[in-house]
Image: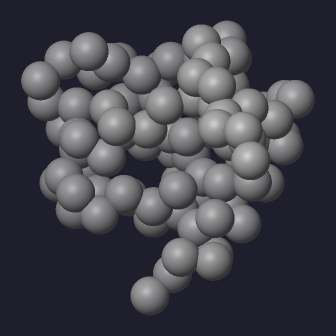
Amino acid sequence: MTPTQPLDCRQGCGACCIAPSISSPIPGMPNGKPAGVPCVQLTADFRCAIFGKPERPSCCSGLNPSEEMCRNDRHQAITWLAMLEENTRP
């Protein structure tokens, strides 16, 4: 099995800021966010407003784009992340 290669974020995607739930505090969302809800830090052009800043949660900064996650387009990425969310729900 070949490990997935890291990618650059796809412009206009933001799937990882929408599809998964986040249980840790996010600036503007002290209780995190539920799956399927856009993060308040997601900008109009689907970028993270706190990318690279210390207040960005570690669960976000530790998530790296990959072929497996990002797939071919935003819709496929959201679908894959939603499936992962469902499969790892406690």
Residue 58 x %, y %: 23, 41
Q: Position of residue 10 (x, y in %)?
A: 68, 16
* Left or right of 39, for residue 86: right
Q: Quadrant of residue 4?
A: top right
Query: Which image quadrant for residue 49?
Result: top left
Q: Quick one: 77 or 68, which is closer to the camera?
A: 68
Direction from residue 53 to residue 77 in the image, left or right: right
Name the residue located 62 percent from the left edge and 18 percent from the top edge: 7
Along the horizontal axis of the image, is 27 left or right of 68? left
Q: Is 31 drawn above or below residue 8 in the view shown?
A: below
Considering every residue shown, the one lying at the far left of the view is 54
Outermost residue, front direction? 1
Q: Position of residue 59 (x, y in %)?
A: 31, 46
Way the structure is coloured: one colour
- Between 85 and 68, the one nearer to me in the picture: 68
Residue 45 appearing in the image: no
Residue 2 screen position, x and y as percent: 72, 39
Q: Could you tell me if residue 69 is visible in this image?
A: yes
Question: In the rendered image, which quarter contains the C terminus?
Answer: bottom left
Q: Nearer the viewer, residue 37 or 88?
A: 88
Question: Considering depth in this image, is 75 or 69 the residue closer to the camera?
Answer: 69
> Residue shown at 22%/31% (left/top)?
56
